[in-house]
Amino acid sequence: MFDIVLAGVITDAPSLGSIITRILMWMLGVFGTVALTMLVVGGAYILTSGGDLSQVQKGKSIVLYAVVGLTVVLSSYIVVQFIGSIFSGA
């Protein structure tokens, strides 16, 4: 993975921008997973409400916030990719 010169200097270490991009991509993956899970939870609230309007409303608000969260995650992914391409020069 890394080429080490005899003097102990790492020659092929990843750049700081590459490390930051990897961390941000990992975080976006976690947030996306949480948003999708909440989408399922909100749907479960709606499906199991049994006609209770407060449960239906709670499920609708969970679904709404999950969709907003997914929108933010996908937008953030695009921004991270764009900024990463600027700094990597590709």
Image: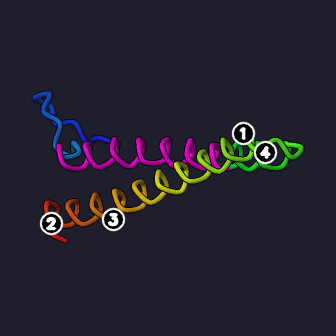
* Front residue (pair 5, 47): 47
Of residues 13 and 56, the one drawn nearer to the viewer in this rendering: 56
The residue labelled by disc 4 is 44
Q: Nearer the viewer, mark 4 or mark 1?
A: 1
Q: Residues within 10 Å of mark 3 (few under 14, many from 20)?
A: few
Find disc 1 in the rendering and name its residue. Answer: 54
- Residues under numbered marks 4 and 1 in contact, where contact means CB atoms less than 8 Å apart: no
Tags 2 and 1 touching, CB below 8 Å: no
Whichever of labels 4 and 3 marks the residue nearer the N terminus, that label is 4
Amino acid of disc 1: Ser
Q: Mark 2 sits on what residue?
A: 86
Whichever of labels 1 and 3 marks the residue nearer the N terminus, that label is 1
Separation (CA) of disc 4 from disc 1: 14 Å
Residue underneath mark 3: 78
User: Amino acid type of disc 3?
Assistant: Ile
Which image quarter holds the C terminus? bottom left
Mark 4 is on which residue type? Ala
Amino acid tagged 2: Ile
